[in-house]
């Protein structure tokens, strides 16, 4: 890796560091520079899949054919103990207004005994919690008790279809039976290892792309409460892993694999009943485009249709293809559809250049001088229409970094979708990708700006050479610049923005990221969102694997 070892850096122009003292340590603060340049451990008798040592937890993940991979980064090793809770050692000074609970979800267990999973997305869900109060931090982690996880723990093998793993049939008849359960959805995993959201009524859901993988958890104890049961009759087996959630409503998309298209549905806060809003028919074929996430504006829902499409035959395979459950159909075209929230009617459907994205950042409406909406602007983390990013996330690839620059380029892709009947939309880079190292994924914004014109986004970027995003970046979409935090050898997860109570400015708050460090340690990093300099870090007493997405539960909605 390029750059100096030791403490992290944040970008823009170089800014002198400062010394700060914390409760347990003294440390030199992060220095801003451009990209170019004692907890209390509590044991639990609950058995884990991999045997836990008698001392505090440590990370370990055997490879598929034995071997422990001693030189591998802790980010890609399973957490060995099922749960832990304790006070975190602080370095730096936490803002006293930071009062609530940070939750992160993601795959954190990639092995069953000596059998190691193939892909990052296969791992069983591991929750991380950091509760902030009065300048102190208490941390915890725990496995989500999904049916898939409990069955694997009981039988010592994969029992449900994960992202790239499928149960190994004992016979041909067993294989035929598996196919039947696939079509009914009963063999699909409920391993909710992707997203985590706080609903408007305070309930917290862990999510994945299967509807059965919507699981309610207790944000204070991390206990699994049970399945989130939808009370409507809309059905469906899969949905977008990233719904849009506000204080009053919940929006998601349900793909139709038989008649390619997507149902747009919403749910009022405090209910479990989804309501059908409208349907978008896909313009390309032979299946709907994969929609991992999507954006909304004040009046519209944006439904993406990229050439990376669901593939029924790949769903049936016992062994994965390079694109797993999908196929790339460049000839089918790429499109962006816009639906009116009020009427459910599609008001625009435009062809755009091919694209590949996991995560949309935000969208907003452009208006003319008379206030009429003339276009929708939608931003995403776009991988330059390169599908290889999926296979780069095989655990073997992540664990075998040799110093070569193998991370595919990514950018902030900005769509402009006209509402005047024009058949074509635009896709361009919202800023020079070199500002954030040509890496861009795992994004968050100020939640008060969802669906509105905004300026700042927080994401994971890159300092080359690398094989995975290894920086945190604050993107200024007005000035078209980025500030970047970097620590040599560290693997940070999604920086989640938490606004300061009563804040007026869009970037008045902090960005929180769980970081897996080069030396095997782990900590929750707190950055001043305005300057993007380190404020504090709360250190876990053991290694922590990489995780995906986060949410914030303010103190008034969690226990005192």
Image: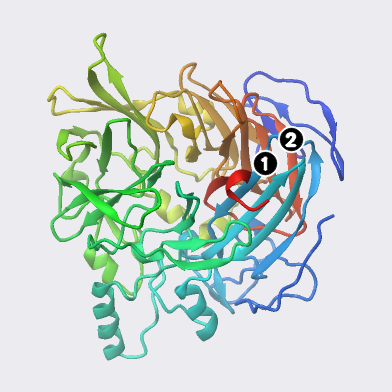
Q: Which residue is mark 1?
A: 99
Circle on res. 52: none
Residue nearer the viewer, 45 or 4: 45
Residue 254 on image: x %, y %: 26, 54
Above or below for 308 versus 16 = below
Q: Mark 1 touching mark 2, by CB under 8 A?
A: yes
Q: Residues within 10 Å of mark 2 (few under 14, many from 20)?
A: few
Residue 509 on image: x %, y %: 62, 30
Residue nearer the viewer, 188 or 265: 265
Residue 290 on image: x %, y %: 29, 51
Q: Secondary structure at mark 2?
A: loop
Residue 189 horizontal side relative to residue 541, left or right: left
Residue at left offset 26%, top offset 49%: 265
Q: Secondary structure at mark 1?
A: loop
Q: Which residue is mark 2?
A: 96
Q: Residue furthest top?
A: 369
């Amino acid at each position: 890796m390029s750059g100096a070892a030791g403490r992290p850096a944040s970008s823009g122009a170089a800014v002198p560091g400062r010394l700060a003292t914390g409760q347990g340590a003294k440390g030199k603060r992060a220095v801003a520079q451009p990209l170019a340049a004692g907890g209390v451990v509590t044991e639990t008798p609950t058995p884990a899949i991999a045997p836990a040592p008698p001392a505090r937890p440590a990370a370990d993940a055997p490879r598929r054919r034995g071997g422990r991979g001693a030189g591998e980064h802790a980010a890609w090793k399973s957490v060995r103990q099922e749960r832990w809770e304790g006070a975190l050692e602080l370095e730096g000074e936490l803002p006293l207004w930071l009062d609530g609970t940070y939750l992160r979800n993601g795959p954190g267990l990639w092995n069953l005994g000596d059998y190691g999973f193939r892909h990052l997305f296969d791992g069983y869900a591991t929750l991380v919690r950091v509760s902030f109060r009065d300048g102190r931090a208490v941390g915890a982690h725990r496995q989500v008790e999904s049916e898939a996880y409990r069955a694997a723990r009981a039988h010592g093998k994969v029992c449900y279809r994960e992202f790239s793993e499928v149960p190994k049939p004992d016979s041909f008849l067993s294989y035929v039976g598996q196919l039947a359960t696939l079509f009914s959805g009963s063999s699909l995993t409920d391993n909710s290892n992707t997203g985590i959201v706080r609903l408007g009524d305070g309930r917290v859901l862990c999510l994945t792309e299967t509807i059965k993988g919507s699981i309610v958890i207790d944000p204070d104890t991390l206990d699994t409460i049970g399945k989130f049961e939808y009370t409507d009759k809309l059905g469906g087996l899969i949905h977008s892993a990233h719904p849009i959630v506000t204080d009053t409503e919940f929006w998601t998309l349900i793909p139709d694999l038989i008649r390619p298209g997507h149902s747009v549905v919403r749910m009022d806060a405090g209910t479990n009943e989804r309501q059908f809003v409208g349907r978008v028919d896909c313009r390309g074929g032979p299946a709907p485009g994969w929609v991992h996430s999507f954006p909304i504006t004040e009046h519209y829902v944006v439904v993406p249709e990229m050439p990376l499409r669901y593939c029924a035959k790949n769903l049936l395979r016992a062994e994965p293809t390079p694109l797993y459950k999908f196929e790339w159909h460049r000839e089918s075209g790429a499109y962006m559809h816009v639906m009116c929230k009020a009427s459910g009617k599609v008001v625009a459907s435009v062809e755009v250049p091919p694209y590949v994205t996991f995560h949309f950042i935000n969208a907003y409406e452009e208006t003319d001088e008379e206030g009429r909406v003339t276009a929708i602007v939608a931003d995403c983390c776009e991988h330059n229409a390169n599908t290889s990013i999926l296979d780069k996330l095989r655990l073997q690839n992540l664990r075998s970094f040799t110093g070569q620059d193998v991370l595919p380029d990514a950018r902030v892709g900005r769509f402009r979708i006209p509402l005047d009947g024009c058949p074509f939309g635009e896709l361009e880079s919202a800023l020079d990708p070199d500002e954030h190292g040509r890496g861009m994924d795992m994004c968050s914004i100020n939640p008060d700006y969802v669906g509105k014109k905004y300026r700042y986004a927080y994401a994971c970027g890159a300092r080359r050479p690398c094989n995975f995003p290894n920086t945190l970046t604050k993107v200024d979409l007005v000035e078209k610049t980025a500030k970047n935090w970097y620590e040599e050898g560290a693997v940070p997860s999604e920086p989640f923005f938490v606004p300061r109570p009563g804040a007026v400015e869009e970037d008045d708050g902090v960005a929180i990221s769980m970081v897996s460090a080069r030396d095997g340690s782990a900590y929750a990093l707190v950055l001043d969102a305005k300057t993007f300099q380190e404020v504090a870090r709360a250190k876990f007493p053991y290694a922590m694997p990489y995780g995906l997405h986060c949410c914030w539960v303010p103190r008034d909605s969690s226990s005192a």
